[in-house]
Image (cartoon, rainbow, N blue to C red):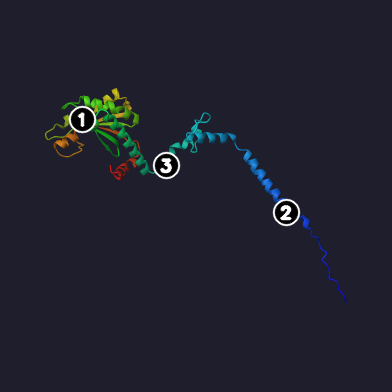
Amino acid sequence: MNRRRRVNRGTPHHVDERWMASYMDMVTVLMCLFIVLFAMSTVDQEKYERLKESLATGFGDTPSELVDASAGMVVPEESAGETTELFSDLELARLEVQEMNALQQDLLGELDTLGLGDSVRFAMGEDGLTMRMVNSEAFFGPDSATLLDTAVQVLDRTAPVMAESGRHISVEGHTAAQPGDAPLLDWELSSERAVNVVRYLISNGGIAPTGIDGTGYAGYRPLMEGFSPEAMQANRRVDLVLHSDEPDSVRALIPRVLAEQGQ
């Protein structure tokens, strides 16, 4: 008995419809492309121009005439003072020492033009940069507070540099203690010498009265102990201290930085 194999006559399969899957994929990709292009075409033109001007001004390529540079800063203007937090106290101390070294070179350069570089000594510490007018006989008469020509020349050459630095200046008078000295006379002499230097810098050096002060210490802050000629010469002096305006935490690290640099 012949049996015919049944043929499955289900839903017919049309191979010519496979193109629809590729077509739908292509349409989806095109739709995404046009969405992206539309989004790019709606850039905030004002913000774009401000960014362009800020970058150009910051890198020094072109001067900005349309935008204030501060308005285009990445850091808001009201937060500009907080940028110091990006530096550690030790890094700030190193920067302060670098500035004091540059200031010392400027002062010494002015004195060298007159051949007076050897008439002063420099020292750095927590307070700042100190310019010492040592060997007071070169700057004042014996037991006198009157400024001699050498003192006037030193102050004339260094005053513009000190004024430009913007640092507060303390003028400190010192005498060399000797056996049998009258302490009150030493206090008067050291104070008077400091005051005369302050008066000259204000009157002739362009230093603001609010940016300077004077104090006498007599012989109670010696650089060298004893009564040898060398000690007497070193202790008899007038110091001009250009103070550091860094916080105490930074200034306390200045000696460490100086030690690292071998100063």
Which label sits in the foreground, 2 or 1?
A: 2
Badge number at residue 137: none
Which amino acid type is shown beneath numbered disc 1? Ser
Q: Residue furthest bottom?
A: 1
Residue 203 position within the rendered picture, expressed as x and y whole percent measured from the top left: 29, 22
Q: Is residue 32 visible?
A: yes
| Upstream in sequence: badge 2 or badge 3 | 2
In the rendered structure, the answer to whether residue 24 lies left or right of residue 79 reads right
Q: Is residue 30 above or below residue 74?
A: below
Residue plotted at (42% across, 42% down): 85
Residue 219 in view here:
no
> First in sequence: mark 2 or mark 1?
2
User: Viewer-proximal residue, 251 or 14?
Assistant: 14
**In the image: residue 103, left or right of residue 67:** left
Q: How packed is label 2: few (under 14 Cα within 10 Å), some, or many (20 or more)?
A: few
Q: Which residue is mark 2?
A: 21
Q: Is residue 186 left or right of residue 9?
A: left
For image coordinates 16% across by 32% down, the residue present is 183
Q: Amino acid at mark 3?
A: Glu
Report the quarter where the C terminus lies. Answer: top left
Q: Closest to the observer: 97 or 22?
A: 22
Q: Nearer the viewer, residue 27 or 83?
A: 27
- Find disc 3 in the rendering and name its residue: 85
> What residue is shown with label 1?
190
Amino acid identity at mark 2: Ala
Tag 2 and tag 3, C-beta contact below 8 Å: no
Q: How many marks?
A: 3
Q: CA distance from mark 2 to mark 3?
A: 59 Å
